[in-house]
Amino acid sequence: MKDLEHKYIRWSDNCVWQSFGETLAVLHTLMPDAGLIPAENVTPRIQLNDVGKDVWELCDGTRTFKTIFEQLLEEYEGDPEKIEENLRKTAIELEKKGFLSFEDTPKEYEYTDINPEMYPYWDDNVLWNEVENQVLAMNNQTGVSFEFPEDLGKLWKLCDGKSTLREILVILEREGGVDKPHPKNMVHLLLKQLIKLNMIVMRDSPVP
């Protein structure tokens, strides 16, 4: 698609993201439908640098390509034609990979945010089991399943609605349940994915 000037650039409904310092990790909640997106373009996750992060944050569905380009001109020095060309290439590539969509009219995005004072809890339709330290959960209503990496199974088990996310993070850090860089941000990203998949709900109060 070449005529983007008046298209509204919007995050895909199937994506969640989280800042990791100067970069931004964006991932699909589910792998894109191979019938809609060519297999060679399918990727579950991308990592955007600081400039890509700035561009991404403008793609909320309320701005056209032209508006985003004009805002970038105010923030960055350089050849306007070069900036527009790079923006166009980036937008088209992310749309092909299923991370962005092009809309004819403004379209609000239902943003998934994480409040550390809320209580993560398994969705009522979710069944899960642990076999040899491997946790597998499935939403019995949607049929969506999620297999947890071994080091994140403990996170799932702690989402029993009795502890706030802040308390869960303290437990994980104390017990070495998350030993990767930026553990807090990584947990937030995973929870956003689980919320989008209707595997986890965030409660205002603990489960009785």
Image (tube, rainbow, N blue to C red):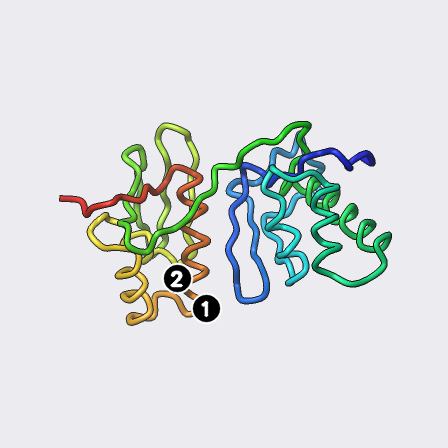
Badge nearest the viewer, 1 or 2:
1
Q: Which mark is residue 127?
A: none
**Residue identifier under label 1:** 180
The answer to whether 25 appears left or right of 190 in the picture is right
On screen, residue 175 above or below 99: below
> Which quarter of the rendering shows the N terminus?
top right
**Residue identifier under label 2:** 151
> Which quarter of the rendering shows the C terminus?
top left
Q: Amino acid at mark 1?
A: Lys
On screen, residue 46 above or below 61: below
Q: Amino acid at mark 2?
A: Asp
Q: Position of residue 29 (x, y in %)?
A: 51, 42
Q: Residues within 10 Å of mark 2 (few under 14, many from 20)?
A: some
Front-most of residues 71 and 48: 71
Separation of residues labelled 1 and 2 (CA atoms): 10 Å
Farthest residue to the front: give it. Answer: 74
| Quadrant position of residue 198 | top left
Q: Residue drawn at (46%, 53%), measured in percent from left and top? A: 189
Q: Residue drawn at (67%, 56%), measured in percent from left and top? A: 52
Farthest residue to the left: give it. Answer: 208
Task: Kindly check if marks 1 and 2 are in contact, taking CB atoms under 8 A apart as contact.
Answer: yes
Q: Residues within 10 Å of mark 1 (few under 14, many from 20)?
A: few
> Does dot 2 land on a helix, a strand or a loop?
helix
Q: Position of residue 118 (x, y in %)?
A: 28, 50
Q: Position of residue 33 (x, y in %)?
A: 61, 33
Q: Position of residue 15 (x, y in %)?
A: 54, 43
| Quadrant position of residue 188 | bottom left
The answer to whether 33 appears left or right of 141 in the picture is right
